[in-house]
Image (spheres, helix red, strand yellow):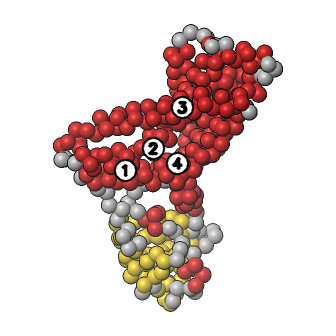
Amino acid sequence: MKLIEYLFRKLIPLFIGALVFFAIVLILVDLMMNLWNFISNGVSGLKVLRIMLLYLPKCLWYATPIAILFAVSYTLSDLYANNELIAIFASGVSLTRFTFPLLVFAFGMSFALFFFDDKIVVPTYAKKTAEQEAVLNKDKSLNNDKIVILSENGKICYKAEFYDDSTKRLTSVFIIIRNEDKTLSSIIRADSAAWHDGKWILTGGIQYTQKDGTIHAGYVTQDNLERLIEPPETFQNNVISVETVDSATAKVYIEHLQKAGLPFAEPMSLYYKKFSFPFILFIVVFLSVGLSGKTRKNVMLMSLASCISAAVLFYVTQMITMLLAKFGAISPFMGAWFPVFMFVVIAAVVLRYART
């Protein structure tokens, strides 16, 4: 227990320091990229400060893997350089047993990073983007016109003249409903449709059906009304980026693409990436354990070099697999998770030949 306490007393201050340092660097980079735009639009210092504070959670999310990699790598390398690990090994404690609490800590942090991203990073970054676009006069309306949306794998087609996002209302609506064999079942015409309790409520709705070569007009059947559940977000004037929304919204968006028969490989791989990326914390700690102690000189420099090299290699590998998933060469699941599996194996091999 004393060894674990000693290990974390050395690790935690380094991790927090590295996290703050890398987060500040990311904030400053973003500030420098937009500084001239802020100045030319006369944005006040307090407003810029608020925008940067909203960007802070995103920067912490980006910085966490590099910070923990650096902290673990430097801590263990420093212990090697000062011969402290030799004493630990001589007392019968192996490297795996000594660093096991670090792996447990990193595994738990991986889950925490996912929830941090889903519940805090996504909404604050969305506010940051919205406020930055507002002060730079780049507001984008979510209202939409001349809309055509497919649903239920093409069995339902919505056509609307206009969508008002503030009231969640469609105007001049036509809804074409097809049978399983894609033959025409009925056409619904409505003056407007309002989103309420998870479905569209029609105003002035009339249903047209064909029977014996004759068109019949009547009330919209209850069965068809129950099928009008395409979410309002589908009608907005935007293309959703799965990376910028929470997992629940991303899932709804992907389900819409699947129902509409539209390509969904790339969004699906990005959705899986939301779950796989946080495990980079576990991977980098696993790698650090195996890579530490390779040199007793320039511990700070070698720790920085190893953490940057490992992070870059992982990101490049993931970028390649995500591209392969996008073009259908591999499944979306493998596009997101293959780098994780591969680097766990690499880390295990490196640890197998580490100095103990």
Residue linked to disc 3: 13
Instruction: Report which quarter residue 318 is drawn in.
Output: top right
**SS at badge 3:** helix
Q: Nearer the viewer, mark 2 or mark 3?
A: 3
Mark 2 in CB contact with mark 3 (< 8 angstroms): no
User: Which residue shows up at 49% across the image and 30% down it?
Assistant: 18
Distance from Cα at disc 2 to Cα at disc 3: 21 Å
Graded by Cα atoms within 10 Å as few (under 14), some (14 to 19) or many (20 or more), the crowding at tag 1 reads many
- Identified by mark 1, the residue type is Lys
User: Which residue shows up at 57% across the image and 22% down it?
Assistant: 74
Graded by Cα atoms within 10 Å as few (under 14), some (14 to 19) or many (20 or more), the crowding at tag 2 reads many
Residue linked to disc 1: 128
Residue linked to disc 2: 58
Relative placement, left or right, of 51 versus 301 is left
Distance from Cα at disc 1 to Cα at disc 4: 15 Å
Distance from Cα at disc 2 to Cα at disc 4: 8 Å
- Identified by mark 2, the residue type is Lys
Closer-to-camera residue (23/236)? 23
